[in-house]
Each structure stands twice: as C-alpha cells, then as structure tokens.
Amino acid sequence: MAEMTRSELRRNRVLVLSTRGVTARFRHLMEDLRKLLPHGKKESKLDTKDRLSSANEICELRNCNWCLLFECRKHEDLYMWVTSIPNGPSVKFHVSNVHTMAELKFAGNNLLFSRALLSFDEKFKSTPHFRLLKEMLTNLFSAPEGHRKTKPFVDHIISFHILDKRIWIRHYQIVEATEGLKTTKAEKSSSSDLVEIGPRLVLSPVRIFSESFYGSTLYENPVFVHPNVVRRMLRNQNSKAYERRTIRKQKTEKRKQKLGREKNQVDNIFAEEPESEED
C-alpha cells in the first residue's frame, strides 16, 4: 500500500459502526475510539454478520474512504475490521484486554476532537505486514489538517507498541510544566509529561485481505489462537481436574479400608444401652 499524499489525507473520512449483538462494554469502547476521530462518522448497526462487505455501500453513501467495523461473536469475542474503501486492503483484528475510559477513570483529559500525535514502535519497520498495518493505522487515526471539526491544538498522543506480536494501544495527555516556576524557555519547551487517559486495548492481527472485507489472503497470523480453542482447552483442563480429584478420593477411601482400625471397647462406652424388657 503506497503512502498517501497530503491532499489524500485531507480527504480522509472514517465510518465507525458495529454489527448487531455488540455488548454495552464494547459499545462504550467504540464510542471512546470515535471521540479520537474528528473525521469519523457514526452509523447505525449493520444488520447482517454474514455479508460484512455490505458496509462498502454504506461508506460510499456517506462519502467515507475508511471503515472501522466492530464485530461481536458469542457476546464475548470482539473483532475489529480496518479497511480502505473501496479496493482494500483490509485487516481483521481480535481485540483483547479492553478497558474503557469509564472503567479506568484516569486523571488525564484532553480537548475533544483535537489533533493527536501518533507514536509507533520501531518494530513496525521489522516486517512487511507490520509496515502495512502502520500505514493503515496512520490513515485511520490521523485527523485531516484543516478539518472543520478539528481544534487547533495538539494536547494528546496515541502510542502503538508491539509486544508478543500484538499491538498495544495507549492514549496519553501531554501535560506541560507547572506555572509559577522560574525556568528558561528551553526548559519550558522540554519539560512536559504524559498522563494516561484511556482507553486501553490490544489488537492481535488475524488476517490481512487484499480487498475490502474479502479477497486473497496477504498475511495470516500463525501464532493466533481462536478464542473458541482457548475456551475448549480450559474446559478440558477443568474436566481433567475433576477426574483427578475423583480418583484421589477413591484412593483415599481404599487406603482407609486397608488401614482399618481395630474396634476398641471404649468406643461404645457412651452409647445408649437397649432397654431391658420387663417380664
């Protein structure tokens, strides 16, 4: 995917929507991410889960060239699609370690719809698919210069780091030096700190397609384990734990029977004696 020019970036518009069945927690995450996109447009839920490509038509009607789609499976697995309209490419992420702004309650705060700085890890240059993901995330989160909703301030930063072949996303506020201290201009320009705002999430790339929501597979993550497989392994471990506990109980009972204690005359000293029948 070739790098986009400044004029193309200026025309970037992102459509943010979800499929039906998204839980309240995931819906709050979607709303938090939408607040980070001044060039984003909100749309009602997509009716179908089988034909995600129908979102292309909605994007064309809303004059959007990027789509951020949240797909929920079994009310507990969240997938995020990032696709370029209309010819792709598109990537499917599995979202984990979700923490919304309402859950975190950090002290940081930033101006709504202000432009953000994007910080990428050096590991994004290591492989071709990470370079492609960096370009797609840049086009997704970069607010166009001169957009009517953007504010003329840069007071927050979005960081993308790679760890365990997953993308960790964090959001920080840029806090300048406290006023009232006698510092030089150079110290004031360099004395700044980062305060986390939220949300937090981790993206595991599942597959990259050549076109929008479909097409040939450009990359498939070999280390990704489907959540259904993880849940099945946990069930098997729990069932084996029950079997081991049952076997231990049986062995304990057999050992007690073998080591049976001889009866003592004192054991029944306080037992009630049967009443003698009167003649």
Image (cartoon, rainbow, N blue to C red):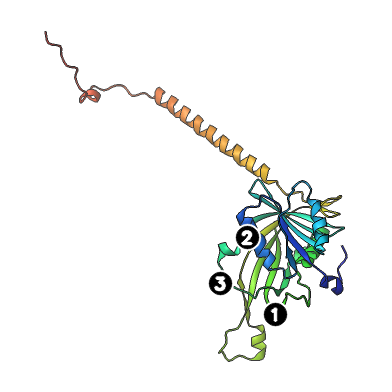
Q: Position of residue 114 (x, y in %)?
A: 69, 75
Tally of numbered tags: 3
Label 2 sits on residue: 28
Label 3 sits on residue: 107
Calculate the distance from the C-alpha at mark 3 to the C-alpha at mark 2: 19 Å
Disc 1 crowd rating (10 Å Cα; few below 14, some 14-19, many 20+) is few
Q: Is label 3 or label 2 in front?
A: 2
Q: Earlier in the sequence, mark 2 or mark 1?
A: 2
Q: Secondary structure at mark 2?
A: helix
- Residue at 43% across / 26% down in the picture? 253
Q: Secondary structure at mark 3?
A: loop
Label 1 sits on residue: 153
Calculate the distance from the C-alpha at mark 3 to the C-alpha at mark 1: 19 Å
Q: Position of residue 78 (x, y in %)?
A: 68, 52
| Residue type, label 3 | Ala
Depth order, front residue of 147/116: 147
Say which quarter of the image contains residue 111.
bottom right
- Residue at 76% across / 70% down in the picture? 142
| Residue type, label 1 | Phe
Numbered mark located on residue 215 in the image: none
Q: Is residue 74 left or right of residue 214?
A: left
Residues marked 3 and 1 touching at CB (< 8 Å) = no
Q: Position of residue 237 (x, y in %)?
A: 59, 39
Q: Earlier in the sequence, mark 3 or mark 1?
A: 3
| Residue at the limit of the structure toward the left, as seen here | 279
| Residue type, label 2 | His
Q: Is residue 150 left or right of residue 29?
A: right
Residues marked 2 and 1 touching at CB (< 8 Å) = no
